[in-house]
Image: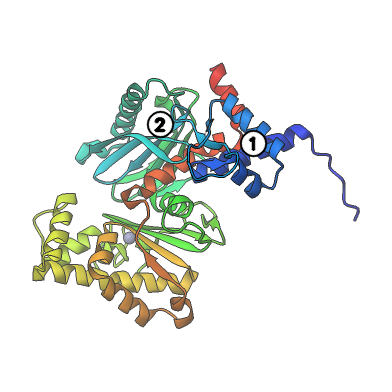
Amino acid sequence: MVAQRVAVRPEEIRRHNLSRLLRSIHQHGELTRAELTATMGLNRSTIGALVSDLVALGLVTEYVPSGRDRAGRPSHVVAPRADGPYVLAVDLAVERIVTAAVGLGGTVHERRVTTIEGADRLPRAVVDQLAADAEWLAERLPGSQGPVGVGVSIPGTVRRRDGFVDHAPNLNWRAVPFGELLADRMPRRLDVQVGNDADLGAVAEHQRGAAVGCEHLIYLNGSVGVGGGIIADGGQLHGVGGYAGEIGHMTVNPDGPPCHCGSTGCIETYIGEHALLRAAGVTDQHGPQAIAAVFEAAAAGEQRAVDGVHTVAIWLGRSLANLVNCFNPQVIVVGGSLAEVVRLDRVSVETELDRRAMAAARAGVKVLLPGLDQDSALIGAAELAFGTLLASPDSMVASLTTT
Ligand SMILES: [Zn+2]
């Protein structure tokens, strides 16, 4: 077979490099021209021309560092423009909605947190809230170039292509065309992307959190619901429909407690927040305050709470062992309220992991807390929303100025 020589036009190369350069600055926050030259493998004049293009597009700015200890001519620093475009990132959880304006470089410019319960969780009510949040944020960022996309994190199974939520058990959503509903309420030009919370958390922790540089990682997100995001060999494991990673609904005891998904004895019924409250003997309260109270009591050494956290820690260790045996990750980042279980009783988690995981896979894995604290899913939603701008900066900016 004769390989065909395909002529690549200089304009295509320029666009490709423009995207790479913007991605680099987005990932690192800011870089010197010298660092860009070294990491991108391009010569100084090409980097200079590309940076000028991004400056002209209003995406980045350049400044000369004022450090006194620099010898010779300092290299210009290229940084995202603070008043440049931002995305609307949304972390929809069972008990609250966080909506934030996030700029290039992952900077959270502004955020709004709304507590939700009962009818506030209905899809239409959530869409109304997000439309109000978008206006609220825009008012607070008057000089900015406005949002360029919307990314939403959902605690459920999501079809990536169109943001169709197949099932979000703890919101009680089934078959909700959420991406479409939200896009209809947003300004026309805004692209709406929807993803699963743990999948997005994994992306964010990989990109700028505890697992930077790890190509095999799992982000286990545990609050009311429990889900996982899996990155293998640097790429996210989505499965054929995008529904992979429902770790919370792996069966660990078919005779166990009923689960919101309709099954019984899922992992979630042993390490989710309802399980923690049950194990700590709390029967008359639920919600974030009740959970915080259990953690406080456990930290203060109150026996009932200590026992509750210990019980969940043991089951968490068992869950992690299953993941280690299946996926052989370098790192498991444990987020949500489960992070607090690790903080309070890491010994029980690790001991159970030692007991249950295959030795070779166990030896290579670290259990870490999130580098982004409670913002993993939110920052992941922002990464999703930035996709189009990062892939094609000049056509995206052109489309903004013509609408
Ligand atoms: Zn389940």
Q: Position of residue 94 (x, y in %)?
A: 27, 46
* Comes first in the chain, label 1 or label 2: 1
Left or right of 251 in this view: 113: left
* Residue projecting furthest to the right: 2
Could you say which quadrant of the image residue 347 lies in? Answer: bottom left
From the viewer's perspective, is residue 337 above or below residue 377?
A: below
Q: How many labels does the image show?
A: 2
Please report the residue visible at 48 percent of the width from the left and 22 percent of the height from the top: 188
Amino acid on which the number 2 mark rests in the picture: Leu
Could you say which quadrant of the image residue 321 lies in? Answer: bottom left
From the viewer's perspective, is residue 55 above or below residue 336?
A: above
The local crowd at label 2, few if under 14, some if 14 to 19, many if 20 or more residues have their Cα within 10 Å, is some
Q: Is residue 252 visible?
A: no
Label 1 element class: helix
Q: Is residue 281 visible?
A: yes
Instruction: Check residue 18 in the rendering and tell me which mark sits there, or answer none.
Output: 1
Q: Where is residue 162 in the image (x, y as percent from the top left)?
A: 49, 39
Could you say which quadrant of the image residue 182 lies in? Answer: top left
Q: Position of residue 345 (x, y in %)?
A: 24, 70
Amino acid on which the number 1 mark rests in the picture: Leu
Q: Mark 2 points at which residue?
A: 181
- Front-lying residue, 348 or 54: 54
Label 2 element class: helix
- Front-lying residue, 318 or 11: 11
Quarter of the image for the N terminus: give it: bottom right
From the viewer's perspective, is residue 165 above or below residue 329?
A: above
Left or right of 368 in this view: 4: right
Please report the residue visible at 63 percent of the width from the left and 28 percent of the height from the top: 53
Left or right of 32 in this view: 347: left
